[in-house]
Amino acid sequence: MPPREHVADPARIHHEWDADLEPVLSINSGDVVHYDLLAAGEGQVWPGATYDEAKLDFDTIYNLSGPVHINGAEPGDTLEIEIVDLRTGDWGWAAFLPGMGLLPEDFPDGYVRTFDLTKGDTTTLVPGVEIPISPFLGVMGNHPGDPARQLPFPPHRGGGNMDNRHLTQGTTLWLPVLVEGAQFSCGDPHAAQGDGEVCVTAVECPMNASLRFRLHKQGLAAPSFRVPPAAVSAKDALGYHATMGIDPDLMTGAKKATRAMIEWLVDEHGLTRADAYVLCSAVGDLRIIEIVDAGVWNVAMTMPLGVFQSS
């Protein structure tokens, strides 16, 4: 049978991994599914909303589309997902929340800001600071298996809430199949995010997505992905500024690097500390620079200079 195209019903959403859910579609290997995905926090945050106005509910914050049943998929197989097309909606939001993120002790109060995504390839944080739009889905996953019901985060052995900014249009993802039919779901669309998502959100947004699925009758050691040249982010093309956190503890090193970057953004570019933290989450990348030197980690936070219009 030749490959077919399908449309997932946008009204069929769920908020957790649940093996008892009726599939929204049953498809064959090679088929394409088109999605109209709600933003995380749809109805809980809206354009122009402040933290005090927002009604964030983590029990229902993720609006996942699916599950999609892949005919013939069995535990031990591999599901290949080709990311054919991603298009953001008109607006997005970012936040940090009390007790969450990389630096909750530094930012005890909540903060929400929203973004206009209609003006082109970037969105404005503040005048003079432009965040490049690079859409991807924060959640793509097969049902993780036992137990039958699980929270939508953190990520799991079948993928899930990976928040992997490299899974952009043109990229291919491979996930292990852990239950009959794979029971694939996706959601949590992002317009932009750095490696680390340090403030606990990206630029969250609605999105139209098209994914092609292929089933492989062999196993997979770990979720994997491939980024071809056309899909590689160009955000570092003008170079970047980096701060390093050197410490025997990975988390402490990451915090040191991020705190130093926040201070640089405040001192060098006049951002508020809140907006600097959001910018680190939206475009800054945490990187392990060195790991093998006598038990001391070197973790860097890099900030692409191209986000600053003066560059």
Image (tube, rainbow, N blue to C red):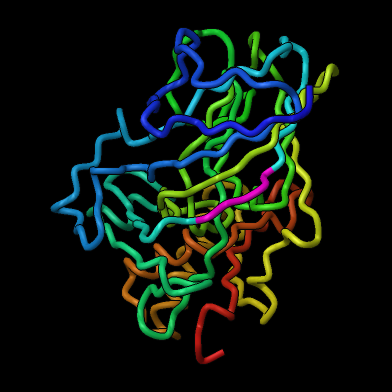
Using the rendered image of the protein, determine whether residue 249 is visible from the camera's viewpoint.
no
- Residue 268 position (above or below residue 108): below
Quadrant of image for the N terminus:
top right
Quadrant of image for the C terminus:
bottom right
Residue furthest front as drawn: 1
Helix, strand or loop: magenta stretch? strand
Residue numbers of the magenta segment: 83-87
Question: Who's the residue at 39% across and 53% down the image?
Answer: 103
Q: Position of residue 241 (x, y in %)?
A: 61, 77
Q: Position of residue 185 (x, y in %)?
A: 53, 28
Q: Nearer the viewer, residue 63 or 56?
A: 63
Q: Is residue 225 left or right of residue 57?
A: right
Q: Position of residue 153 (x, y in %)?
A: 46, 30
Q: Nearer the viewer, residue 209 or 194?
A: 209
Q: Is residue 266 left or right of residue 46?
A: right
Question: Who's the residue at 68% across and 64% down the image?
Answer: 233
State the image quarter where residue 232 is shown: bottom right
- Residue 120 position (above or below residue 174): below
Q: Nearer the viewer, residue 45 or 147?
A: 45
Question: Who's the residue at 77% across and 23% down the image?
Answer: 215
Please check the rendered image and state whether residue 120 is part of the magenta-colored stretch, yes or no: no
Residue furthest left as drawn: 53
Q: Position of residue 213 (x, y in %)?
A: 70, 31
